[in-house]
Amino acid sequence: MATDALLAKIISQAVSNTEYEALQQYLKLAKATPKIQTEDLSYLGEDVSGIYRQVSPNGKFEKSISLDKFTSARNVPAATGTLIHELTHAADVALDTQVRTTDNKQLIDAYSKLALDLSSPYKPASKQREQLAAKLNHKSEVDTYRTSNDELAAFGVGNSSGKPSTQPGSAHLDSTMATEFMLLLDLALRDLKSKGVQQ
């Protein structure tokens, strides 16, 4: 299957997904839509099925999502979940930037309680989120990568989208993190729209 045809197939499955649509709408309004492509990611390890990158050549941020072309071709539904996972990373970065520059108290308060300690530029998880993730993760072995602050929302939204990726976690953990992130995304969308930002 040609790379362009594979990506088209993955996206055609994703467009019927409410999480995908909400992420795309937010990223478009926030002017943070990444380029999406398939490529050989085997050099990153056998467990890597996708990656979100944000690089700054020439002082301008370029955002991109790469899906592994081999694992994607073998399992298009899982690749759709991976795409949603990586789009969540892109939205999480844009949301962090928006919260640090908005005057919307409701969004700032919700973000501070559910996601991050805004007093630091280094994105530490709020204590409530860490404690909740520890309680909800019923797996016998705790995967510190999967339950890290940068991955909680992405795995939650990706796995709760009905297109689970290759690393499912506790159902309660994923659904709670997905719900929290989608609530934050809704508040962020409302904030952008209230400021007259249009598609």
Image (cartoon, rainbow, N blue to C red):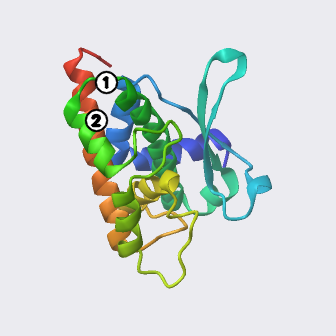
Q: Is residue 17 visible?
A: no
Relative side of 143 to 153, left or right: right
Residue 150 x, y percent position in the rendering: 51, 51
Which residue is located at x 50 percent, y 36 percent?
Answer: 121
Front-lying residue, 110 or 73: 110
Binning the other alpha carbons within 10 Å of mark 1 as few (below 14), some (14 to 19) or many (20 upward) gives few
Residue 108 is marked as 2
Residue 138 x, y percent position in the rendering: 41, 80
The vertical placement of 194 against 146, above or below, is above
Does the residue at mark 2 contact the one at mark 1 (Cβ under 8 Å)?
yes
| Amino acid type assigned to the residue bearing label 1 in the image | Thr
Binning the other alpha carbons within 10 Å of mark 2 as few (below 14), some (14 to 19) or many (20 upward) gives many
Relative side of 79 to 92, left or right: right
Residue topped by disc 1: 102
| Amino acid type assigned to the residue bearing label 2 in the image | Ile
Front-lying residue, 139 or 62: 139
